[in-house]
Amino acid sequence: MSAAATEAAVHVERHGGLAVVTLNRPAKLNALSSALEQALLDALATPEVGGADAIVFTGEGRAFCAGADVAEVTSLDAEAIAAYYRGSGRVYEAVAALGTPTVSAIHGYCLGGGLELALATDIRIADDTAVFVLPEVDLGIVPSSGGLTRLVRMLGTARARELILLGSKVDAETAHRLGLLTEVVPPGEARERALAVADTLAGKPALAVAVAKQAIDAVAESSNAAALLIERLAYGMLNQTGSASR
């Protein structure tokens, strides 16, 4: 296993064809400061991540991620907010746009921006210690890093209202039942299970996975006729590349 660190706040490791990106701010429960978000952006640009067949995102210590660094976020004015989304705040969409399959390995707190980061990945594996909350409305703001949009598309408006307006605390089993999680495992096993799932994804034809990811996102925003066309165009393109025979 080779390893590289892009910043102290984020560690990148390679396990064969898999990259593991670890939030490494355990004293702050991996709270997402702009410095940590920038470190994540930098991590995505490393050869260890860019050349991986699948990527696992996880957190060091007692939590996956306790959300945004509230003191930093609430101090921003309108101009600073716009600059933030042009800078480190674009990391969530950068994760969502990866052609490589992504898996979150979640334990402990997964709050606010941490949940938004997890929602930007393809597969979410959590252990029984995981707790999910979107506290933004109680802070006088709303989820704004893709979480509100992804929740509505994933769970529908009624469930999204429940989680966003009430700020309901959700345990791992409830999150799985709602459809937020792919799988729940015993305490301490999320990382190993995520690596196993990532290894399965890494063994699939890379182009077919990348196109399927794009098609799924596009279909979610399309009419039925457009969605069917996207499916057929994606199939036709892949069939011509020889991916179907791999």
Image (cartoon, helix red, strand yellow):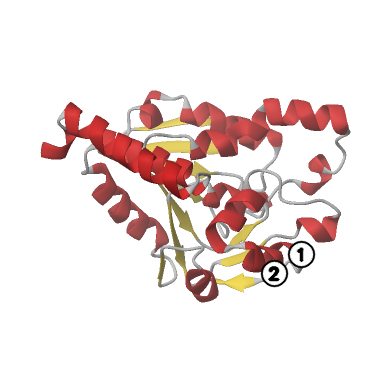
Q: Position of residue 194 (x, y in %)?
A: 36, 55
Above or below, comparing residue 189 to residue 78 in the picture = below
SS type, badge 1: helix
The residue that mark 2 highlights is 162
Q: Position of residue 59 (x, y in %)?
A: 52, 51
Above or below, comparing residue 109 to residue 33 in the picture = below
Camera-side residue: 142 or 189? Answer: 142
The answer to whether any part of residue 19 appears in the image is no
Q: Position of residue 98 (x, y in %)?
A: 44, 34
Quadrant where the C terminus lies? top left
SS type, badge 2: helix
- Quadrant of the rendered structure where residue 234 is? top left
Q: Are marks 2 and 1 in contact (CB under 8 Å)?
A: yes
Q: Which mark, by number, is residue 100?
A: none
Q: Which mark, by number, is residue 165?
A: 1
| Residue drawn at (67%, 34%) of the image | 89
The type of residue carrying mark 1 is: Leu
Q: Position of residue 180 (x, y in %)?
A: 51, 63
Quadrant where the N terminus lies? top left
For marks 2 and 1, give the CA distance. 6 Å
Farthest front residue in view: 225
Q: Is residue 205 left or right of residue 163?
A: left
Q: Is residue 3 left or right of residue 68?
A: left
| Residue drawn at (54%, 67%) of the image | 130
| Residue drawn at (83%, 45%) of the image | 71
- Quadrant of the rendered structure where residue 15 is? top left
The type of residue carrying mark 2 is: Glu
Above or below, comparing residue 156 to residue 12 in the picture = below
Q: How many marks?
A: 2
